[in-house]
Image: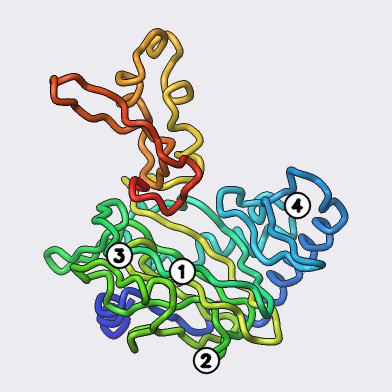
Amino acid sequence: MDAKERYFWDLTGHLVVPQVLSPDEIAEANEAIDYYTREILKIQDSDNLPGRPDVRATTVVRTSNKHPYFLEMPSPYSDPFRKMLVHPQIVSRLNKMCGRGFRLDHGPELIGHVKGVDGLRLHGSGDRHKPYVAYRNQNGEMHCGGVTVSYQLSDVGKGDGGFVAVPGSHKSKYIIPEDLKYFKSDMDVLVQPAMKAGDVLFFMDGAQTHGTLPWQAEHQRRSILYKYTSRTSARQGTAEEVAPPKNYWDQSITDGMTPEQLAVMWGPYSNYHEELPVLGIDDQGIVYTEEPIDPDNIWSDRRG
């Protein structure tokens, strides 16, 4: 990571590194996605498809980042994605961005939008301070708790849609205006980077305000996203599955505990929704457990 990249990353909250993948590597990854798509279409009536894909007609437009099936596929189809996991150009930069000892938290996932697929509203930065994904610079060293690495397997032109961000928002002190959050106004602050197949996008996932614009190009978007964190950050993935007290502790430890006692026995993961109990104290000084309002609301104000 040279001085120019470091400056751009610190200033904007994202960075595009060109031509990380060779034409052969791009072809291998796309061939593996084609293989995955063919296999999914054979069994798409199942409720438990590998990778939990969103299938539209004959196209997989997205897979779940909680189910990294691209790392599980039989060789040689998993090989490109395992190579991407620790690609030298990724490792060298993540050592500076996240710090040495960074880890994969969740992903890889495919975003394979076709024309007409909706985007996703802006999120991250300004909702609340989230130390586990926040960015800081101390003593000349950068640290970001959550960095997404997005490999481009197809071209993304200006106006095509896809990833969009508010540069510099990782340093903002104020909440995202509602009109901007839902793309009712761009306030002249949105940037949608143009990229070529083989380029890699890094962005501060959670620290920088970002989202997805509807895909407008005639060809399919193909991006493979890996969600990395610093060593001490646990966002979701396996951490989320292990966190409930019944999984995190021996049963003999938690048997007979009150709901309030169990609330502090959850294991660490930060990307919680309303399933995580929150403690309060009433006017009489009694500790109680706040009831979740909507456990399925991923945009809840109580979300981690």
Q: CA distance from mark 3 to mark 4?
A: 38 Å
| Circle number at residue 74 | 4
Q: Is residue 38 left or right of residue 134?
A: right
Residue sitting at 53 percent across and 83 percent down?
19
Mark closer to the chain start, 2 or 3: 3
- Say what secondary structure mark 1 lies in: strand
Q: Nearer the viewer, mark 1 or mark 4?
A: 1
Q: Quadrant of the N terminus?
A: bottom left
Residue picked out by circle 2? 158
Query: Disc 4 residue type?
Result: Pro
Asked if disc 3 and disc 1 are in contact, CB closer than 8 Å, the reply is: no
Relative image position of residue 69 (x, y in whole percent): 66, 51
Q: CA distance from mark 2 to mark 4?
A: 36 Å
Mark closer to the chain start, 3 or 4: 4
Q: CA distance from mark 1 to mark 4?
A: 35 Å
| Circle number at residue 125 | 3
Q: Nearer the viewer, mark 2 or mark 1?
A: 1
Relative image position of residue 52 (x, y in whole percent): 67, 51
The one nearer the camera, 240 or 202, is 240
Q: Nearer the viewer, mark 2 or mark 4?
A: 2
Relative image position of residue 222 (x, y in whole percent): 64, 74
Here the colouring is rainbow
